[in-house]
Image (spheres, rainbow, N blue to C red):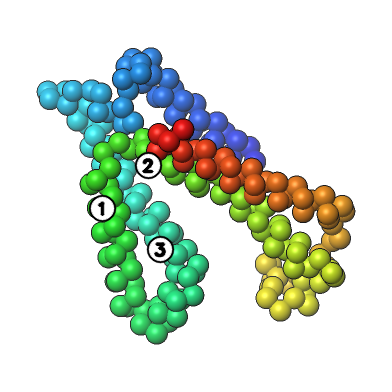
Amino acid sequence: HACTSLLSFSAAFAIYSSFAVAGLGLFGNSVHGNVLKNYPADGNLFVLLAWLGMAFSITFTFPLVFTTGRDSLIALIPGLQRASKRQPMKTHIGLTSSLVMAIATAACMVEDVSLVVALGGATIGSLLCWIFPAGVFLKVALTNASEQTPLDQHPSEEPLLPRKKPKALPALPNAGLLVAYAAGMVLLGTMSMSVGVGNALGML
């Protein structure tokens, strides 16, 4: 698995980097966020095929990403959870329609796709790499600061694998230093996200 992941990410990085370098080398500072907009589409079959390929990519990948985001939003907001249990069909239709219309409206108003990519990278990247992992650790460390509770005695935990008895949580060495380190990661991630959002919006 590790070898497959390494090869996959390396291949994706090489392909994306080659396209980025090629676009920058060909158009310089005048390159658009979507490099296809730099090419004239009139009478150019290959450019039209590239646009068509991007349309197919968005059409078939958007439902997958949207479904995951909608389900995560429902799991995150208690009000939506209660509504989905009481009236699942109405909640599903209303939430799906509202999100699709909001996304379509934003897509029609924002012409530069690089702005969306920059904002997504600044926020989601910082949250996934810095803030969320450290926040989860801080939550666990502060909740179980007084005692270490075995997983089989924890009311909200279930064993991930059947027929496997969960082991007790190990004691964390230098918990105070790890908590301080995690808090520093949250602070650093917040600062990184703020700088990224400021640069994307042209405020810095």
Task: Locate residue 167, reporting x and y percent.
Answer: 81, 67
Within 10 Å of the Cα at label 1, are there few (<14), some (14-19), or many (20+) other Cα atoms?
few
Tell me which label, 1 or 2, sits earlier in the chain: 1
Name the amino acid type tagged 1: Ala
Q: Which residue is mark 1?
A: 104
Res 3 → quadrant: top right
Which residue is depicted at the point 50% across and 47% down?
Answer: 124
Please, what secondary structure does the residue beneath circle 2 have?
A: helix
Q: Which residue is mark 2?
A: 116
Name the amino acid type tagged 2: Val
Front-most of residues 106 and 194:
194
Q: Which residue is mark 3?
A: 70
Tell me which label, 1 or 3, sits earlier in the chain: 3
Within 10 Å of the Cα at label 3, are there few (<14), some (14-19), or many (20+) other Cα atoms?
some
Q: Is residue 70 left or right of residue 148?
A: left
Q: Quadrant of the N terminus?
A: top right
